[in-house]
Amino acid sequence: PFSEIGVFSQYGWRAMVKYNDKRTEISVNGGDVQLFNRHNSTHKTFTLSPELREELLTVFRDVFGLDISNWSYADGGLLDGKNKNIAGLLVIWDILVREGDWLVGSTYGDRYKWLLDKAVAAGGKPFLVIINGQEFDFGVRLSEHIFLPRFTEDFNSVWEFTQLVNKAAGWKGPQDGEAILEGIVAKDPNGKLKPDNGKIDNNTDWSARSRIYTKRSRF
């Protein structure tokens, strides 16, 4: 519950928005792009368009400054395609491999800072989303449809932002279906990336979630 997740801030953890998304891992290799879900298989209800493929290549090459002929791998999410306000948007919150270099042992704080520094160098503009006529800053713009979330010490501001966005979208509770934003993800900036063990719960010891009350979860 939100009333309890704030305790993590006392230990230096920071918060970002939990979007209503499909977990999406992004592989760029040899100039090609592939998207995988949390089970390392392709999304059943999403097909990568040529336009988004090119947009991802541009972000990896021109914003992140990576050689796209080498393998790089990022972690993020496709926002809820059933919601017209956010359909087609992609958030990237981590980089796991850079040009063939697995970043095992690196901290989340360092990896996020690398992404943020690249985004700021490319302009650092806010990624603005219009919801029923109201404008909201979802993070740092990487391209037209791709953004980096903000990572803050202010847990309250993240929770309040979640409430404001969902209210603007007309969401009042589980009876209104899926919300645009689901709550907070807290992460330890000093949490270190572990080797891939093929399990979806790998590297979960440095993150925690607090959700709004939905049909799928009470918190």
Image: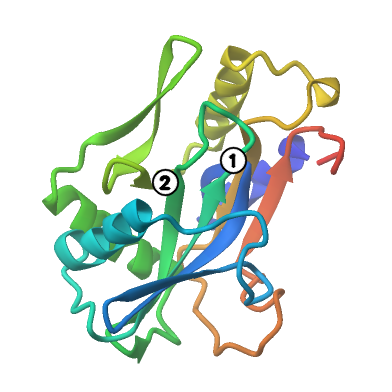
117 over 195 or under it: above or below: above
Mark 1, secondary structure of its residue = loop
The location of residue 173, given as percent across then percent down, is 80, 21
56 over 150 or under it: above or below: below
Q: Amino acid at mark 2?
A: Pro
Mark 2, secondary structure of its residue = loop
* The one of 58 and 173 positioned closer to us in this rendering: 58
Q: Residue at position x 60%, y 59% from top?
A: 23
Looking at this rendering, what residue extends furthest in the top direction?
A: 133
Provide the residue designation for mark 2. Answer: 149
49 displayed left or right of 98: right
- Marks 2 and 1, how far apart at CA: 18 Å
213 displayed left or right of 106: right
Residue 162's image quarter? top right
The mark nearer the N terminus, 2 or 1, is 1
Foreground disc of the pair 2, 1: 1
The location of residue 115, given as percent across then percent down, is 29, 61
Q: Residue at position x 70%, y 75% from top?
A: 200
Q: Residue at position x 39%, y 64% from top?
A: 109
131 displayed left or right of 43: left
The location of residue 219, given as percent across then percent down, is 81, 41
124 displayed left or right of 184: left
Provide the residue designation for mark 1. Answer: 81
Image marks 2 and 1: residues in contact by CB distance under 8 Å: no
Q: Residue at position x 44%, y 9% from top?
A: 133
Instruction: Give the quadrant of the N terminus.
Output: top right
Q: Amino acid at mark 1?
A: Gly
